[in-house]
Amino acid sequence: MLNFELYNPVKLVFGKGEIEKVSTLIPKESKILVAYGGGSIFKNGIYDQVKKALEGFNVVEFGGIEANPYFETLMKAVEIIREQKIDFILAVGGGSVIDGVKFISAAAKFEGDPIDILHKRIIFKEGADVVPFGTVLTLPATGSEMNSGSVVSIKATQEKRDFGGSAMFPKFSICDPTVIASLPKRQLQNGVIDAYVHVLEQYLTYPHEGFLQDRIAESILQTLVEIGPKVVENPTDYALASNFMWSCTMALNGLIQKGVPSDWATHMIGHELTAMYNIDHARTLAIIGPNLYRVLFETKKEKLAQYGKRVFQLTGTDEEIAREAIGATVAFYHTMGMKTKISENASNIENTADFIVNRFEERGWKALGERQNISLEKLREIVELSY
Ligand code: NZQ
Ligand code: ZN
C-alpha cells in the first residue's frame, strides 16, 4: 500500500428531514449568500425548506448557476460577495451549484486574475483565503458535497477545467435522500453512472496491496449495479434513495483513493466532450471509459479480471473475464440509459480527436493515466474508437 494522508473535515448531516438543521450549522451573525441553479428548488419545495430554516438570518440570493457552471456566471456572484460583504455561502443544488460555489468562495478573496484559478489550477490550502461555505445537496452524483474539487467551464474559450485544495471542502453538507424524488430520470441515470465511474477511476488500475480499498470499491460498484436500475424507476423509495445518495458520496470523498494508484483519464477526456458538445458529464464517461479500457487492456487486464469476477461473477480464464468485464460494464451503462458512442450524443463529430489531442498538447499534457502511459497517440485511439 502507498503512504497516504487522510483529511476530510466535512460535517455530513444525512437523512430525511435534516435540511432544517441548516440553521444550527451556520454562525448566527453571518451574512449568507444562498446560491442555486436554474430553479428546480422552487418546484420541489427545497427552497421553502431552506428559506424557513434560515429565518432570522441575513440572506442574499444568487440563482442561475447552470449545469457545467460557467466562470462568466460565477464571477457575477463574486461581485455580490465583495460588494455586500458576504461571509458565508450556502450552495443548494447538485454538483454544478456546489462546484460553482467552491469557485465563488475561492475567487472572492483571490488577488490575481480569477481565470488563473482555472488555467493555472491554483491550489487553495488556507481557510483564510476563501469564503466558508456549506451545501444542501439536491442531486447525488459527483461527491462534491464531501470533497475539495471543483470543475468549472469557461464560455469564452469553450473549456472545462478543475481546481481545488484542502480549503475547498464544504464546512458541512446536508444530504436528505428524499430530494431525489423530483429528479428527472436522465439525472438519476447520470448520478448512478458518474458515481460508478468515480469508483472505476480509483480501482481499475493495476494490482497493488490495497486489499481493503479494493473491497470497499467493489462494494460501492455492486451496490450501484443492484440499486441503480431500481432507483431510476422508484426515486421515492427511501431505501433505494438513501443507498444511492450514500454510495455517490462514498465514491468520491477521498476514502477509496487513499494508498492506491488512480487514473482519472476518462474524466479528463470526458470534460472535453462536454466542452465541445455539451454532453452531460456522466454520459461522456460512459462513452470514453470502455474504450479507454480496450486501448489500455494490457496494463489494466489484471484489475479488469478481478472486477469481472467480483462485481459481475464472470467465469473463464483471466483474459476472457477481463474482456467480458468491459462488455458487462457497457451492458450496465445501456441498462442505465446511456448511449455509449459520441455520434449518438452529438453531430458533426469528425474533428473530435484532433481537437482533443491538440488541446492536451497545448496544455503540455504528454501522458495521462495511473501509469502515465496514455500517450497522445493512445488518446487519439480512445477518442476515435468512441465515435
Ligand atoms: O439547475 P436546476 O434547476 O437546479 O436543475 C438541475 C440541473 O438542470 C437539476 N436538478 C438538481 N437537483 C434537482 C434537479 N432537478 C429536480 N430535482 C432536484 N432535486 O439537475 C440538473 C443537473 O444538475 P448538475 O448539478 O449539473 O448535475 P451534477 O450533480 O451531475 O453535476 C455535474 C457537474 O459536476 C461536475 C461535472 O463536471 C459537472 O460540471 N463534477 C464535479 C466533481 C467534483 N466536484 O468532485 C466530480 C465529477 O466528476 C464531476 O466532474
Ligand atoms: Zn465524474
Image: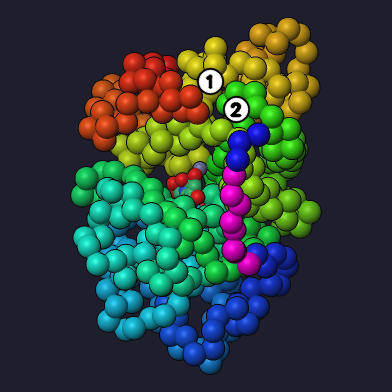
| Amino acid type of the residue that numbered disc 2 sits on in the rendered structure | Leu
Q: Are dots 1 and 2 in contact, CB under 8 Å?
A: yes
| Disc 2 Cβ-to-ligand 2 distance below 8 Å | no
Magenta-colored segment: predominant secondary structure: loop
Helix, strand or loop status at disc 1: helix
Q: Say whether residue 10 is magenta.
A: yes
Q: Quadrant of residue 12?
A: bottom right
Residue extent of the magenta highlight: 4-11
User: Mark 1 highlights which residue?
Assistant: 293
Residue at (25% x, 55% y) in the render: 115
Question: Is the residue 32 above or below the residue 236 in the image?
Answer: below
Helix, strand or loop status at disc 2: loop
User: Mark 2 highlights which residue?
Assistant: 204
Res. 92 in view: no
What number of labels is visible? Answer: 2
Quadrant (top left, top right, bottom left, bottom right) of the C terminus: top left
Q: Position of residue 155 (x, y in %)?
A: 25, 50
| Left-right relation of 320 to 122 | right
| Amino acid type of the residue that numbered disc 1 sits on in the rendered structure | Tyr
